[in-house]
Amino acid sequence: MSAIAAVLQLLVAAAFVSIPVVRARFGPAAKAAADAELTRQGVRPAVLEENGLRFDAGGHETWAPASVAGVMVGVAVLNFMASAWGQTLTWVFSSLVLALNALILHSQLTAAKSVQAAFRRKGDAELARIDVPAFLKAAEGAFPAWVTIHQNIRHTVAFAGSALALILVSL
């Protein structure tokens, strides 16, 4: 059972690695679309960079999912070796992945409200003028349609893979 759990953990790792890969590939187009929308709204596109907002795979958009993937690969190796540590660490990290993926999904479902709130917290008058739903729609429109399907598959793999790994190491 631990070998099957390990395979599931490798799938979870791949799902997390796919996040920065997609952002690296399509982030520049999303930024260009967002900049065009801001210009249409009469807002300087530079306000995004001035406030640390990005669409590329830089910063936490790479290190966070890569770290999750690295940990899951390490735990998978322990499970392939049938190490007792594999079971213990599966309980710790698969549980964390479930919680983390729930947060990611929540942030995606509430993106407009979250971004509006973040813009308000910045206290920047220019950010406050942005029509956030239109801005986000423009950026999201720069990603190919299959990215939405990819996100759904990634969430399914992260949730189901982690839950099944927890069950399998408990048997």
Image (tube, rainbow, N blue to C red):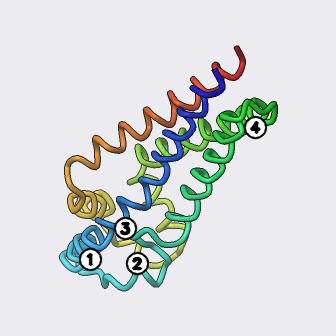
If you read the primary sequence from the N terminus, does the residue marked by circle 2 or circle 3 appear first? 3
Q: Is residue 105 above or below residue 162?
A: below
Q: Quadrant of the N terminus?
A: top right
Say what amino acid the circle numbered 4 marks.
Leu
**In the structure shown, which secondary structural element does the residue marked by tag 4 occupy?**
helix
**In the structure shown, which secondary structural element does the residue marked by tag 1 occupy?**
helix
Depth check: give the residue in front, 54 or 119. Answer: 54
User: Picture coordinates of residue 31 (x, y %)?
Assistant: 30, 73
User: Picture coordinates of residue 86 (x, y %)?
Assistant: 74, 35
Horizontally, is 148 left or right of 103 in the view? left
Say what amino acid the circle numbered 2 marks.
Leu
The dot on residue 48 is 2
Instruction: Residue at 47%, 54% (x, y): give it.
Output: 17
Name the quadrant containing residue 59.
Answer: bottom right
Q: Is residue 170 above or below residue 84?
A: above
Q: Nearer the viewer, mark 2 or mark 4?
A: 4
- Which residue in the structure is indicated by mark 1? 35
Q: Nearer the viewer, mark 1 or mark 3?
A: 3
If you read the primary sequence from the N terminus, does the residue marked by circle 1 or circle 2 appear first? 1
- Which residue in the structure is indicated by mark 3? 24
- Which residue in the structure is indicated by mark 4? 89
Q: CA distance from mark 2 to mark 3?
A: 18 Å
Q: CA distance from mark 1 to mark 3?
A: 17 Å
Say what amino acid the circle numbered 3 marks.
Ala
Q: Are marks 1 and 2 in contact (CB under 8 Å)?
A: yes
If you read the primary sequence from the N terminus, does the residue marked by circle 1 or circle 3 appear first? 3
If you read the primary sequence from the N terminus, does the residue marked by circle 4 or circle 1 appear first? 1
Say what amino acid the circle numbered 1 marks.
Asp
Label 1 crowd bin: few (<14), some (14–19), many (20+), radius 10 Å: many
Q: CA distance from mark 2 to mark 4?
A: 39 Å
